Image: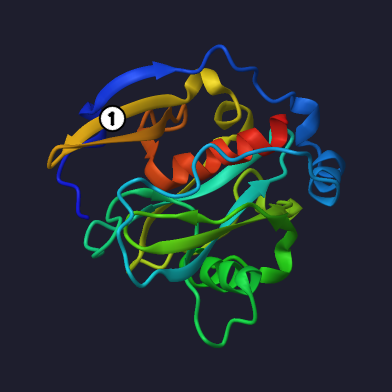
Amino acid sequence: MAFTIDPRVAELLGHDAHLPAVDPQRFTRASLAQRFQQPPIWQPDVEVEKWYRSPNPVAASVLVPLVMRDEPSVLLTQRTSHLKKHAGQISFPGGRSEPTDPDAVSTALREAQEEVGLDPGRVDVLGTLPTYTTGTGFVVTPVVGLIVPQASEGDRLILQADPSEVDEIFEVPLHFLMDPRYHERRAFDVSGTRLEFFSMPWTSHANDKEYFIWGATAAMLRNLYRFLSA
């Protein structure tokens, strides 16, 4: 299903300020690794988008890259506007599985290398979250991995965006994304069907630009929140 509506003007149903933010002590490398080694009992908020109708789902993976700075962040991309699916949206690096990919982790690492030039050897893979099925027919495995910036890179990771797929690479503070005060619940009507989704608008202090994180990316971040807060 192709959307022509601007998600920024969709009806705002509310925020989730009643939910606690994830304790920043859980953002350390040791704590994150332990969480995946000994996962809690938890339940994702969204696993299948309600408007999913595809008879032939396609396996895909995304890398959820946690950049381990003094203040950890999540690396995201803004997709180019000419793509057939998810054009211009905020996304994790990732894409469909290929026959040569041994598993979902391999798909995520390959796609991240192709899209943003991230060497797979730099990613410390912690594990995966439950699959997320998009309305466009992709069954996505989120692969969570840690990236430690090298001293030679200074404050920024040195990456190279594939201009055919990625307009911009940027980072959002992990504490912001793991705080439900900033999780918006929105909805709009399409052909008489009410569709609800999460959004997490974030404005960069560096360039005063708003990045409107929504849809599948926001939902997978919400599921990460549930996983880390359980």
Q: Nearer the viewer, residue 220 or 148?
A: 220
**Total label count?**
1
Q: Nearer the viewer, residue 29 or 197?
A: 197
What residue sits 75% from the left and 35% below the top? 27
Q: Nearer the viewer, residue 162 or 104?
A: 104
Say left or right for 210 vs 179. left
What residue sits 31% from the left and 64% below the top? 54
Kind of residue at disc 1: Ala
Which percent across, then down, holds residue 2?
20, 54
Establish if 188 lies above or below 119.
above
Establish if 170 lies above or below 177.
below
State the quadrant of the C terminus: top right
What residue sits 69% from the left and 38% below the top? 42
Which percent across, then down, holds residue 26?
78, 32
Which percent across, then down, holds residue 212?
36, 35
Quarter of the image for residue 227 reads top right
Determine the residue located farthest toward the bottom in the rendered image.
100
Q: How is the image coloured?
A: rainbow
What residue sits 58% from the left and 23% below the top? 179
Q: Residues within 10 Å of mark 1 (few under 14, many from 20)?
A: some
The residue identified by callout 1 is 187
State the quadrant of the N terminus: bottom left
Establish if 114 lies above or below 190.
below
Establish if 96 lies above or below 198.
below
Quarter of the image for residue 138 reads bottom left
Which percent across, then down, holds residue 214?
38, 39
Quarter of the image for residue 123 reads bottom right
Q: Secondary structure at mark 1?
A: strand
